[in-house]
Amino acid sequence: MRTRRFSTAFAAALVLGAGLVTSAVAPAQAAPIHQHAKTPVAQGYGGAVVSDTAESTQAGLDVLRSGGTAADAAVAVASTLGVTDPYVAGIGGGSYLVYYDARTHRVSTIDGRETAPGADGPSMFLDPSTRQPLSLPAAVTSGLSVGVPGTLATWQRALQRWGRFGLAEDLRPAEQVAERGFVVDPTFRELTRQNAARFAQFGSTAALFLPGGAPPEVGSTLRNPDLAKTYREIGKLGISALYGGPIGTDLVNAAQHLPLAPGATLVARPGPVALSDLRAYHALDADPTQVNYRGLDVYGMAASSSGGITDGEALNILGNVDLAAMTRVQALHHYLEASRLTFADRNRYLGDPRYVDVPQQQLLSPSFSRQRACLIDPAKAGVSPVAPGDPFTGSRSCPPPSGAAVPVPDREHHTNHFVVADGAGNVVSCTNTIEEFGGSGIVVPGRGFLLNNELTDFNFAPTQGSAPDPNLPAAGKRPRSSMSPTIALRDGRPFLAVGSPGGATIITTVLQILVNRIDFGMSLPDAIAAPRASQRNTATTQAEPAFIAAPATRGLAALGHKFAISDTSPLDPTIKTSPDIGDASGLEFLPNGTVLAAGEPARRGGSAAAVIHPTR
Ligand code: GLU
C-alpha cells in the first residue's frame, strides 16, 4: 500500500498536458491512508449502515454517533460515495430516497431524478443527418445524455424534512475523504480499466481517474481535492451553488463545451443543459407505492421510477399463489413468470407521471393481479415478448392480453444502493445513480465530479408499436428509472429495507430478495447472497453462472426457460464485465430489537455493513 506524493490529478496533468484542473497543484500532505476492512453483515442496535465502501459506511456511522438522524447519515453516506464510488454516484447524478419516520410511522419518498433540459425534445437522440437513433455509445459519452442532476437537491430536501444538522456538517466526512484520498481497490481499478478509453477523451476526467495516463494501481491513494473544495463551497453557499451558482456555471460549460483532451477522437456532441434548467430543478416529494404482500406493507418509489409499481405488481401477482408450499422449481418459475408479465406492463404504461397518465392504481389493484396471474402456466414458460395487460378492464376473468407483444431493449448499468437506520428507528433506503459506470465520462473541470448520462434511460424511438410509448424524451421530462429502494413494514413498524443497483435488473433483484426472505425463509444475508436470475420479458432470462449451475435450473429448463449470462460492456462488446446481477444492501429489524445489516459478500467487491453497538 502506498500513498502518491502528488495528487493523481497533478500526475495526470503532467502526463496528459491537460492543465485544466486547478486542484492539480494541491499538495498531498495527508497522512498515509489505511484501507478499511469491509464486512458484509453486522448486527446490533443504536443505528446501522450498509453501503458499498468502508469510508461511506464509516461516514454514516460518525454522523449517527454525533446525534444525526438517518437523513443526516444518508447525506454523509451518499456524499462520501460520491468520492469513493464516483463512477456510479455523486452530485452530477440523481437519486430516489424512501424514508420511514419513526415519529409519525409514515413512509415518504423523494424523487430526485434527473430531468431533460428545456431545450430538449423528442428527437434529442436522433442523428440530425439521418434521423435515425444514435448508437448507445455515441449518446452516452456526450453532453446530450446529461440530465439536470437531482442528487444534491434530494439531500437538501431530506435534511429539510428529517435532518438535524445542515448540509455543511453532513458533507464534512466526504470532504475529508476527498481531501485525504482513499485506497484504490481491485473493483475501482477494474471499473476504471473498462472506461479508460472514453475517460481519456476528456482532459478533466483523465487527469482525475487516469493518473499517469493509466488506471490507478490497486493500493495507491486517489485524492480528489477539487471535490473537497466543491463540497466546501456547497456547505458555504447552499445548494444554489450548483442550482444556478458558480458550480452550476461550470457544469453547464462542461456539457455545452466538452472538455476534450488534446488529440481526442470523440465526435463531440455537446448538450443543451442551461443554468435556467438548474435553477428550475426541484426534488419532488412523492407518495410511495404500497402493496400488501403476505401481511407486510411494502413501500417503494412511484413513477418517475418504474421500481415500486413493477415490484408491487409482481408481488401482487405472486400473492395469488403460495410460493412457500411449492417445489423450488415451481416457485422460481412463478417468480420468473410474474416478472415477465410485469415488464410488459411496465414498458407499456410507465413514464414520468407529469407527462403521461400512469395507471398506478389499476396496475396495483388485486383484480389486475388476478388477470395477470391466470396467464402463468405451471407447465411451461411464457413466450416472450408477452403482451401487456389492460389494467382498465377490471375483469375478474382471464382475458387474453390486449396490447401488442413487443420486444423492448433494456440495459443493466450500475449505481449504488445504501440503507441507514438511526437509534430512534428512522430508516432510509436510497439508490443513487449517474447511469452507466462512469456516467457520460465528463468530469466537470475543477469540480471533481462526473456528469450523469441519465437521459439515455429514455427510449430513443417508440417501442410500443401502435400504442404510445410512455418513455420518449421531452423537455423537462424525467426518464423512466428502474430504481427500487424499498421499505417493508410489519404491523406498521419497519421489517425490511432493501434495494440494489443494476439498471432494469434492479426490479428483479429486489423482487428476488423479497421472495427469498419472505417466501423461502432465507436469512437476509442469504437472501442477498443467493444467485440471481432476471426475467424482463425477453426470450432468454439473464442469470448469474451460479444460478445456471443450480439444481433447480434443470427443472426450469424442462419448463422451457432459457438462461444466459451477460458479461460484456453495453458500450463496447469487446470489454468483458462481471456477470454479477445487482449489488444489494438491506436491513432487517429483528423481533429482539436489534438490526441485521446485510450487503453483498462478493458482488462488486462486497458491501460494508456496520452497526453502532454490535451484538455479534
Ligand atoms: N439508470 C438506471 C435507472 O434509473 C440506474 C442505473 C443502474 O442501476 O444501473 O434505472
Image (cartoon, helix red, strand yellow):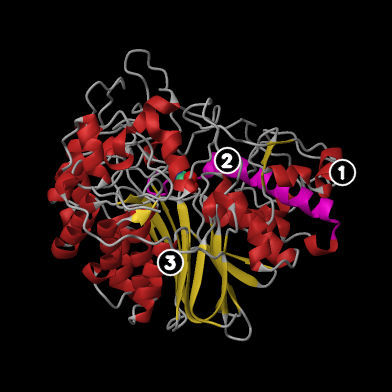
Which amino acid lies under the numbered mark 2 shown in the image of this protein? Ser
Residue 460 image offset from top left, x and y in percent: 43, 29
The residue pinned by badge 3 equals 57
- Foreground tag (2 vs 1): 2
Left or right: 349 with respect to 270? right
The earlier-in-sequence mark between 2 and 1 is 1
Work out which quarter of the rendered image holds the C terminus and state it.
bottom right
The image quarter in which residue 171 lies:
bottom left
* Residue 266 within the magenta-colored segment of the rendering: no
Decide whether residue 348 is among the magenta residues. yes
Q: What separation in Å lies between label 1 and label 3 (alpha carbons)?
A: 46 Å
Q: Which residue is mark 2?
A: 578
Q: Nearer the viewer, residue 602 or 335?
A: 602
What residue span does the magenta drawing correspond to? Answer: 326-355
Residue placed most toward the observer, 593 or 610: 610
From the image, state whether disc 1 or disc 3 is nearer to you: 3
Ligand 1 near label 2 (Cβ, under 8 Å)? Answer: no
Question: Quick one: label 3 or label 2, which is nearer the N terminus?
Answer: 3
Residue designated by label 1: 379
Residue 319 coordinates in the image, percent (x, y): 72, 61
Q: Are marks 3 and 2 in contact (CB under 8 Å)?
A: no
Question: Is residue 228 among the parts visible in the rendering?
Answer: yes
Residue 558: image x %, image y %? 87, 39
Q: Residue at x 19, y 52 (%)?
A: 242
Please tell me whether mark 3 sits on a helix, a strand or a loop.
Answer: helix
Which structural element holds mark 2?
Answer: loop
Q: Quadrant of the N terminus?
A: bottom left
Residue visible at 57% across and 40% down?
578
How far, Cα to Cα, is label 2 from label 1?
A: 33 Å
